[in-house]
Image (spheres, rainbow, N blue to C red):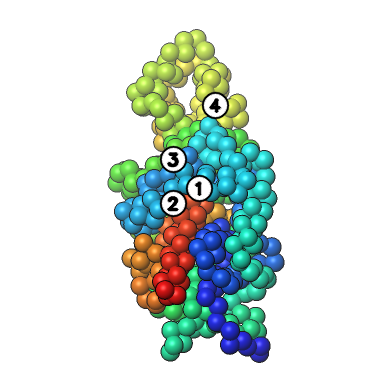
Amino acid sequence: MESTHHTHPLIVIGAGAAGLMTAIHAGRGGVQGVLALDGSRAIGIKILVAGGGRCNVTHHSVHERDFAGSTPASIRRVLNRFTATHCVQFFADLGVELKQEDTGKLFPVTDDAHTVLDALLRAARQAGVQLRHPQRVQNVQVLPSGEFQIHSDGTVLRADRVVLATGGRSLPKSGSDGAGLAIATSLGHSLTPHMIPSLVPLLLHEGHWLRSLSGVSAPVELKIVSGQGKRLHSCRGAMLCTHFGISGPVTLDISRHWTLHQAQDASSRLQANFLPDMTEESVDRWLLAGTGRTVLSRLRESFPDRLAKGLLAEAAIDADATTQGIDRTLRRELVRTLTALELPVVGDRGFIHAEATAGGVPLKEIHLETMESRVHRGLYVVGEILDVDGRIGGFNFQWAWSSGFVAGTAVAKRVAESRA
């Protein structure tokens, strides 16, 4: 086994969004000899695949309420140190201009994620960061001297400070396969009781009619209700029907909440409201207002043809029937189908298809003004490995930028103080 007695001032484990951000700001702050290790053959896979290959860098408006996991107050403390406005300026300084879309998402004007990754790698080189990959870290030990000893692919490295930026378990082909979580626990950190996919498509049971509408999309409200009918959580947005179930922004946003509520109460249910801006009474009046018209033609005003036919079939209503020609009982069943369609979810597509991880190292174990571990001095934890996950729209990247900035600048300050 190759061994080196040279001690690096900082080793960053994981060179994704959070790791690169940490390394850049540590290097810019005067830390010489920053070493970043990444186990993937290709750096920045999550950056390159995000936003359909365009990379949704952040959102124009970021608040702690856009995240789940640790307490909002804790999340806010980190976000406020490096806001979306700071993010836009940071990338502008790197030569990456961002544009805002109607959804509030910010993308590079090139619509190419390589623009973002190339700028980050260039900034890292300019900050003096040495990047090694593929070099996978097997374990990290704390020596009696307080230094860290890192075992990595047959090499033993030493560092004064270590940053865990390994990601969680989502999209394991990118390198975030949970190994970093094991390192964190080996160093004395705990993990949340749950560790589940977030921003992940959901599976409907085989044969469900929505699975036959693959490619059809509609704006809906998805809501989780308890066995007693109490609303537990809801999200609005576009739902996409797929050959396996449902996807689209609203599905991804509610997925982690659905899984957790199911674990707590198996009788909870997921429902879809296809007319979220209307009450049951106003939907009933809307149907009746289509005097002399078929129910299908009425529904076609608001839904794609295939979805309209599917909703009618689910309510057992003849597509050729007029709105006045169906009795009140059938009409009420149609209203229920339109506003509270039960979705028999049987699971999700797992970490392989998830965009984020729900769960991780609790923020209460981290000094939030520096991202330094409360367990070991000199150990920093950033990004998705922490118990913070955002909704779709660039929020998870913003958490990576913010936490990485806080850690990188804190390390630089600590190193400067040690030299004074």
Question: Which residue does the image show at 69% across and 63% down from the upper left?
Answer: 42
Q: Is residue 156 above or below residue 330?
A: below
Q: How many angstroms separate mark 1 from mark 3 (CA)?
A: 11 Å
| Residue placed under numbered mark 3 in the picture | 61
| Image coordinates for residue 179, horizontal then vertical, percent | 54, 72
Q: CA distance from mark 4 to mark 1?
A: 38 Å
- Callout 2, which amino acid? Phe
Mark 1 or 3 closer to N-term? 3
Give how far apart the Cα atoms at labels 3 and 4 are: 30 Å
- Secondary structure category for the residue under label 3: loop
Give coordinates of residue 350: x percent, y percent.
Answer: 55, 58
Question: The C terminus lies in which quarter of the figure?
Answer: bottom left
In the displayed structure, would residue 103 be above or below residue 279? below
Secondary structure, mark 4, is: loop
Q: Earlier in the sequence, mark 2 or mark 4?
A: 2
Question: Disc 1 designates what residue?
Answer: 87
Residue 250 x %, y %: 49, 41
Check contact, mark 1 vs mark 2: CB within 8 A.
yes
Q: Amino acid at mark 4?
A: Phe
Q: Earlier in the sequence, mark 3 or mark 4?
A: 3
